[in-house]
Each structure stands twice: as structure tokens, then as C-alpha cells.
Image (cartoon, helix red, strand yellow):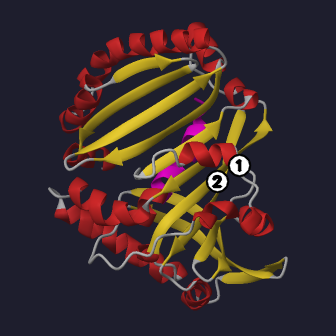
Amino acid sequence: MNKKVLTSSLALAFLLLNLVSTSGANPSRPAPPAEVLSFLPVSDAVAVIDVHRLIYEALPRIFAGDPAKLAQANSEVEKFKARVGIDPRTFDRIAVGLRYTYPSPTITKIETVAIAHGTFDARALVAAGRSAAKGRYREVSHHGATIAVFNIGDQIKFLGLWKMKVNELAACALDRHTLAIGSLPNVRAAIEAGKSGRASSDLVALATRDPNALIGLGGNVPTELLKNLNVGNDAIAKDANSIRQVYGSIGMTETDFTLLLVARAATAADAKNLSDTAIGLKQLGGILIARMAPAKKNLAQSALDNLKITTRANETEIRTQFAAADLSAFLK
């Protein structure tokens, strides 16, 4: 994959992890309204994150054997709150819209906006941010709404482990308990979408197929995106070019995390070819695992051993699971 596409994807993942990497007493949890998804602007992909369960169920299991890392993550969240006045611990659910842009024939960028719903008062949260920013912010009006733009211009350490450069972060109260966070253009797009929404109902349905998922995802796979993929193999590239949509989810049992990924191809024959390629790559997985550091081998081997690949009509489905405790090694 193009390095800039990969970097943008990892940046989103680390941001989401940072927003949920804290623990504490479990507060009362109001059911987030379905309308939180309607604030999403036009998107190529949609993700829905159950922040509450990630905070109070998933992360304590992941870091059960490493309390020092959890304490460090909590410290970094406190720093984030002090810097912009936004406390991720008040988030209940986040809907994320991702849009692909192509500034050049070989580069794909991913623009994201997060719509957070929670127990907070969104307007008070933005006001707290202004105070915390100590002048390093400006206000922009758009369609009658006031957007606070924070001038970060610094490295922010996510999970106490990864550093990312953040220049500006915009935030705007969409209603009393809903906040849009992202770049200024993307927050403007969320305001314009309003409660009527502009994200595809098809993508929203894919992302919410499993109501019990920790994270759900549904996305289109545009031709332009596939052109920028560099898989290094003509046969694999041909299979990838047949994919039209992807969707999936991350779930959790008492001891394990579960992963579902489905590729929807153009035809049933394409899905069968894609399945055959995935099975072939699975057979090579052991070679790659042998080169991993010992701490990471457990998770990788468990995921490979539990990997199941099936084909239904024009869809190729991949399922696996792994112990929650093993995930900690991948978050270093």
C-alpha cells in the first residue's frame, strides 16, 4: 500500500485508541441516539466505535498484565484534556466518516471527521477548550455555528507510546451532547450535513450490522483507491481490483477479541478467486510469524490458527479471534 495511505490509516487508528485509552469507575450510560450517525458528511467509509465498552471492558483486559502502561496512557489522556479541554472519558460513542482524496496519481490521503456523543455538554466542552488553549486558538463561524480551532502545532503522544504531529484541531457543538472533531474543512462538512446527514445509508447499515460490536466498519473501494495500491503481485492486484465494498467488526468475548472482515466482490467468481488467494497467503503466514519478536508471536499465531475463510455468493468472509492479553504486545 502507498506509504501515505498507510500512515493516514495508522494515524486514524492511533487517534481512536487515544480517545478511548483510559479507565475508571463506570458511570451511568445513556443510550446514544441513532441520529449521531446522521451528522456524518459524504463519506467513502463509515466506522462506529463503542467508546464506553472499549474504556470499561476492553482496555482493562488488554492491559491487565501491564498496569504501568495503562497508567501511562491515562496520563497522556490527561495531557490531551489539559491541552484542548476535551475529555475523551465523557464520550459514549463515536461515528467516524472517512473520505479519500487523490492529490496526485500516486498518493491517496484520508480525510476524517469524528462525531462524538456522550454525557458531556458540548458547548461547555468547547468553552473549556478555549480556556485550556491559552490563546492558541481562533473562532470561525459557519452556517450560524461557532467552530473553535485549536493551534496544537506539536507532537501528541497517543497511548503514551506513539507520537503524531498535529497542527490544528477543530471542534464544534452540533447539539447539546454531540461534538464534531477534525480538521476545519471536515467539521464544516459535518455542520452542513446537519441532522439530515449526507453519508450513504448503505455504508451506515454495513457499519452497524452487528449492534454488539466494539467497532463496526463499512466502506466503498473506489477505482481510484485501487490504482494507488502497490501489492507487488499482478494476480493479487487483479483480485483486489474486483472488490467493491468492505465491511466488518471487532467484537469481544469474556477472554478474546473477535475479528470479522468481509470483501464484497463484483461477482461470485471474483469472490472465489479472492478466497483462494487469501487461503494461499494464510499458508505463508507461518513464515512471517517466525520472524516476529517473541512477545508478538502469541497473538499472531493465535489469529492465524483461528483464521477461517469462507465464500458466500459474491462475498469473501474472514474470521479470527485472539486472546485480549496478547494484544498488549502490539501496542508497544
Choose between 121 and 234: the one closer to the eye: 121
Q: Residue furthest left?
A: 65
x, y percent for residue 267:
64, 14
The quadrant holding residue 230 is top right
Label 1: how many Cα within 10 Å (few below 14, some 14–19, many 20+): many
Name the residue at 60% across, 75% down. 178
The answer to whether residue 61 is magenta is no
Q: Secondary structure at mark 2?
A: strand
Majority secondary structure in the magenta region: helix
On the rendered structure, is 281 left or right of 171? left
How far is mark 2 from mark 1, CA to CA? 5 Å
| Residue 17 sits above or below residue 250 on the image | below
The answer to whether residue 13 is magenta is yes
* Residue marked by disc 2: 97
The quadrant holding residue 147 is bottom right
Name the residue at 50% across, 82% down. 120
* Residue marked by disc 1: 43
Asked if the residue at tag 1 contacts the one at tag 2, i.e. Cβ–Cβ closer than 8 Å, the answer is: yes
Which one is earlier in the sequence, the residue at label 2 or at label 1? 1
| Residue 266 sits above or below residue 148 on the image | above
x, y percent for residue 328:
25, 49
Residue 124 appearing in the image? yes
Q: Which residues are magenta?
A: 1-15
Name the residue at 72% across, 47% down. 200
Name the residue at 46% across, 25% down. 317
Q: Secondary structure at mark 1?
A: loop
